[in-house]
Image (spheres, grey):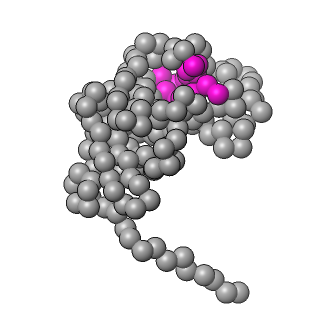
Amino acid sequence: PRSTLFPYTTLFRSGNGMTAGASPEGITVGPDGALWFIERQGNRIGRITTAGFITEYSTGLTPGSQPQEITAGPDGALWFTEVFGNRIGRITTAGVITEYSAGLTPASTPYGIAVGPDSALWFTEFNGNRIGRITHCRRVHRIFRRAVDVDFGDKRAEWDRGGAGRRHVVR
């Protein structure tokens, strides 16, 4: 068998336009064609162009909130979870951050976030042991018990609704 090594030309890291010790995690393509990522330890949202230009955003973000995951939303903005801020955040491509906490379980540690096939945002509450859904009006409408990470890449998700192994499947 023959293997191919895929070369990269540049590695972007702290000190190359990104805050030192930022701990970048989670990356997604934004509606503007740039790549957006979270800086967990840096407590920022980052944006990098394919040319390597990095911009960091923190204005409007709760200090110490530690963003966790990010996804492009159906409204043209990017949405992210804040594990210690106990909030769901929204950032526009212009860098305006808005945080939402109404409807979340107190001290729930929001973690995973994805856009569902219904165009709503779905998120997990790690310590809240639930899954939440945010509709286009930016309100949490349902909280399902016993959360697991949601990934709608294959237009399917499962979660345990509690008791007797009953499961609900979205396809």
Residue found at x 28% / y 50%: 22
Question: Which quadrant would the C terminus be assigned to in this image?
Answer: top right
Q: Residue 133 in magenta? A: yes
In the drawing, does residue 23 fall left or right of residue 118? Answer: left
In the drawing, does residue 67 fall left or right of residue 15? Answer: right
Residue found at x 57% / y 35%: 114
Residue positioned most to the right: 171
Question: Which quadrant would the N terminus be assigned to in this image?
Answer: bottom right
Q: Is residue 113 above or below residue 54?
A: above
- Say which of 94 and 129 sits in front: 94
In the drawing, does residue 39 fall left or right of residue 159? Answer: left
- Residue 80 locus on image (x, y percent): 44, 34
- Residue 54 locus on image (x, y percent): 32, 53
- Say which of 108 and 90 sits in front: 90
- Residue 145 locus on image (x, y percent): 59, 20
Within the image, what quadrant is residue 49 found in? bottom left
Q: Is residue 102 above or below residue 4?
A: above
Residue found at x 51% / y 17%: 138
- Say which of 31 and 78 sits in front: 31
Is residue 83 visible in this depiction of the protein?
no
- Say which of 111 and 162 sits in front: 111
Bounds of the magenta span?
Answer: 119-136
Q: Residue 162 in magenta? A: no
Is residue 155 visible in this depiction of the protein?
yes
